[in-house]
């Protein structure tokens, strides 16, 4: 085959919210197979063997067959390059540590043109995976070398650059398990849990409840100690010093051995332990001076270091550190012994995926000082059988949660409260954490804000602890979901009017409403931005607004195809019609290969698919295809139509459903088994003006249907018929802009 023949990537689109493919974000790629359209896998000599040699785990892909080896069977029978690329990308993501199971490839109306999608937690990671997958499949087709390891490393590097850190990911995962949505607010670890006024924010293991004053106190180790001491928490005696001579004088005054550390350092940088000789104290002072603004000399507390995680005043996890030693053989240097006896431990590594860090002797000044105190250097050769201390307390990564004595739990909870932290990592040095601290002359040596969670999520020894869940449970009450009422309005006819009138009725019910529609962005009854705001970006902005406790969003078919929905689930989902595909009404739909009303069903059903189980779908009963969407809804369904006695309306009521219709000149709310309620008189002068304001040119009857849809929305969220009637009489269809 001509090696210049390539699979062309025509268009790459990141769908950030629920879409026609799935509830989750995906990368959608439009492919042109070119001459490969005539060459499925069984017609490419040697292709299958070369591919499976590079990616042997493809045998685990079930594909449409539904069992192990399913995709291999498809390869043998003959499948097309777009489908193969989908599985290659998924497998590369799996190898890079971001397991991905979802993917689909579908043909379009143009021969050789396909749409391929795969699950994409992060857009940039997905793009790199696509790039590497594309290069791999072309190498296999053309029988040229390909470095799978380098491809996986490239994807993994992008994951490290872009994805949430393990602590944040654990909290977000726990929130997801509880049905609490999230929005990532920056490229780092600032995340919003929940929507609008119901949201909380986290930044790694800090929350919007974490006091800035408390965080400042925790950074000042001397101030922290004085506050803890005043409340009866045992702390080591200490003094702040300004010189190496003063450090030795303080050490003699406190009593040897001592610890020297910066007052405002972190992550153990510049901390030297168990110092008794003047030379060691002076060298440790110089090291600590490099890592903080002041230097603290403290009594050395004998025992192991323990990191105890306190959330909301309660102990939720604890980990212990241990010393790292090597044994000399009379031949190898300290460096070689560390590499052979310690760094070969598979639990050690340079990334956060490893519970223990690699010990890099030449880069760790504390390790070098400890070696000097033993009369050694990194290049020294210890005698055979001599044990050499390399690292005191090393990584604190041995789970000991179940060993924590109740008195210890009380003291660390008190320490966190004294400093003022809702989440704290309290460092306790004691010989046995299962016994009271005071009896062992143990002490609380630090209280840290924003503690790392990895040691509890992936301990080097012992059980992982559900610390993410503990933090989410701290932020949200037992039954809270972080959700506010969200109303999504999808279709093409009258959708802006429905969205605006629904927002008005919600506003009258006492809610602070955010609205994004084709007429602008609204807060309350005021338009704060003009222009078309019926899109994902505007919706996200409203969901991030802490003042908003209800949101109404207009969603066109084009916005769903381009971006997906702005929210994961909604309280009410409205679908008005299956129109708008006719050129030149919306050229965007043609670009997405939508050429008839039937194709819009899959697009607009997205709005119904995301209705919560305690929510409501509002559907136009005049179109039987919309009525059929009722079966897709997890929640309740309200049908609306001008004709109260239309067959679909009657059938729905017979099954116990609710309908909104017109009876004479009244809006009628009907629920089988209940007396119908007339909630508005359309003959009133105010109602006639309002209906006239809802009218759309060239679309007869849309104004009253829009009114009925909005009434159904209000009924769905529990607004009383009396308030609905008052809202219809007072609604002004002319937007008021903020000047």
Image: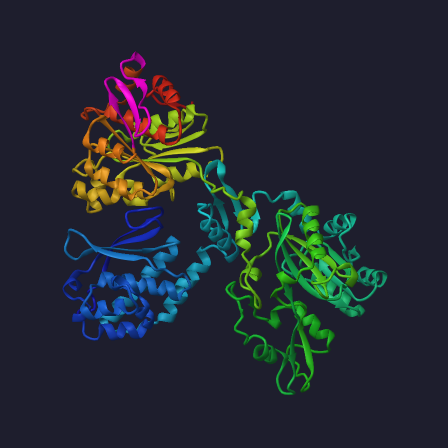
By what rule are the colours in the image chosen? Answer: rainbow
**Residue 365 placement: quadrant:** bottom right
Residue 136 painted magenta: no
Q: Residue at x 25, y 17 (%)?
A: 665
Q: Is residue 31 above or below residue 20?
A: below
Q: Is residue 221 above or below residue 639?
A: below
- Residue 590 vs residue 733: left or right? left
Residue farthest toward the top in the current orientation of the protein = 685
**Residue 712 placement: quadrant:** top left
**Residue 339 placement: quadrant:** bottom right
Q: Which residues are magenta?
A: 658-686
Which one is in front, 576 or 184? 576
- Residue 671 vs residue 646: left or right? right
Q: Residue at x 42, y 63 (%)?
A: 97
Residue farthest toward the front in the current orientation of the protein = 673
Q: Is residue 161 above or below residue 47?
A: above
Q: Position of residue 729 (x, y in %)?
A: 35, 17
Q: Position of residue 714 (x, y in %)?
A: 36, 28
């Amino acid at each position: 085959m001509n090696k210049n023949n390539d699979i062309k990537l025509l268009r790459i689109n990141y769908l950030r919210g629920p879409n026609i493919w799935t509830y989750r974000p995906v990368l959608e790629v439009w492919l042109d197979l070119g001459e490969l359209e005539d060459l499925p896998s069984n017609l490419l000599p040697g292709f299958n063997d070369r591919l499976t040699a590079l990616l042997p785990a493809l045998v685990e892909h079930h594909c449409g067959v539904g069992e192990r080896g399913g995709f291999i069977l498809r390869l043998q029978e003959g499948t097309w390059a777009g489908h193969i690329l989908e599985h290659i990308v998924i497998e590369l993501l799996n190898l890079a540590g971001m397991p991905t199971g979802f993917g689909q490839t579908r043909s379009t109306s143009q021969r050789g043109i396909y749409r391929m999608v795969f699950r994409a937690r992060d857009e940039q990671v997905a793009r790199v995976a696509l790039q590497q997958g594309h290069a791999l499949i072309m190498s296999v087709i053309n029988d040229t070398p390909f470095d799978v390891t380098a491809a996986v490393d490239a994807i993994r590097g992008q994951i490290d650059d872009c994805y949430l850190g393990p602590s944040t990911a654990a909290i977000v995962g726990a929130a997801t398990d509880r049905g609490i949505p999230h929005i990532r607010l920056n490229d780092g670890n600032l995340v919003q849990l929940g929507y609008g006024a119901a949201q909380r924010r986290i930044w790694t293991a800090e929350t919007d409840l974490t006091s800035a004053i408390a965080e400042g106190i925790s950074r000042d180790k001397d101030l922290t100690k004085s506050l803890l001491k005043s409340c009866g928490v045992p702390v080591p005696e200490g003094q702040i010093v300004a010189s190496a001579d003063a450090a030795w004088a303080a050490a003699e005054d406190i009593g040897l051995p001592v610890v020297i550390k910066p007052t405002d350092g972190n992550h153990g940088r510049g901390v030297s332990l168990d110092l008794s000789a003047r030379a060691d104290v002076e060298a440790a002072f110089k090291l600590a001076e490099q890592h903080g603004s002041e230097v603290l000399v403290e009594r050395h507390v004998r025992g192991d270091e323990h990191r105890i995680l306190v959330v909301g005043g309660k102990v939720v996890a604890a980990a212990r550190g241990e010393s790292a030693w090597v044994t000399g053989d009379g031949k190898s240097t300290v460096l070689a012994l560390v590499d052979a006896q310690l760094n070969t431990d598979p639990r050690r590594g340079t990334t956060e995926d490893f519970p223990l860090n690699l010990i890099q002797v030449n880069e760790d000044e504390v390790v070098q000082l400890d070696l000097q105190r033993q009369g050694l250097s990194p290049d020294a050769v210890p005698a055979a059988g001599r044990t050499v201390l390399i690292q005191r307390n090393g990584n604190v990564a041995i789970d000991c949660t179940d060993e924590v004595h109740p008195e210890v739990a009380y003291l660390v909870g008190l320490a966190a409260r004294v400093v003022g932290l809702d989440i704290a990592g309290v460092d306790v040095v004691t010989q046995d954490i299962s016994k009271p601290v005071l009896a062992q002359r143990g002490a609380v040596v630090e209280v840290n804000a924003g503690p790392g969670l990895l040691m509890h999520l992936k301990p080097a020894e012992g059980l992982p602890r559900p610390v993410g869940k503990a933090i989410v449970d701290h932020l949200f009450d037992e039954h809270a979901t972080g959700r506010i009422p969200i109303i999504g309005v999808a279709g093409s006819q009258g959708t802006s009017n429905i969205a605006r009138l629904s927002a008005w009725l919600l506003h009258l019910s006492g809610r602070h409403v955010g609205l994004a529609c084709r007429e602008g962005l609204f807060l309350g009854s005021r338009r704060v931005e003009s222009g078309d705001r019926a899109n994902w970006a505007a919706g996200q902005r409203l969901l991030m607004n802490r003042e908003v406790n209800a949101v109404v969003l207009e969603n066109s078919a084009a916005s769903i195809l381009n971006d997906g929905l702005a929210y994961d689930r909604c309280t009410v989902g409205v679908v008005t019609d299956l129109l708008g595909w006719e050129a030149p009404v919306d050229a965007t739909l043609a670009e997405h290969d939508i050429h008839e009303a039937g194709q819009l069903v899959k697009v607009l059903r997205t709005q119904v698919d995301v209705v919560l189980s305690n929510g409501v779908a509002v559907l136009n009963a005049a179109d039987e295809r919309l009525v059929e969407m009722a079966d897709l809804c997890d929640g309740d369904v309200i049908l609306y139509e001008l004709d109260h006695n239309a067959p679909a309306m009657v059938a729905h009521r017979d099954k116990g459903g609710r309908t909104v219709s017109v009876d004479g000149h009244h809006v009628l709310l009907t629920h089988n088994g209940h007396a119908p309620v007339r909630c508005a008189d359309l003959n009133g002068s105010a109602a006639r003006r309002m209906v006239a304001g809802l009218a759309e040119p060239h679309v007869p009857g849309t104004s009253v249907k829009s009114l009925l849809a909005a009434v159904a929305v209000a009924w769905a969220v529990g607004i009383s018929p009396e308030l609905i009637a008052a809202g219809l009489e007072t609604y002004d269809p002319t937007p008021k802009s903020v000047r």
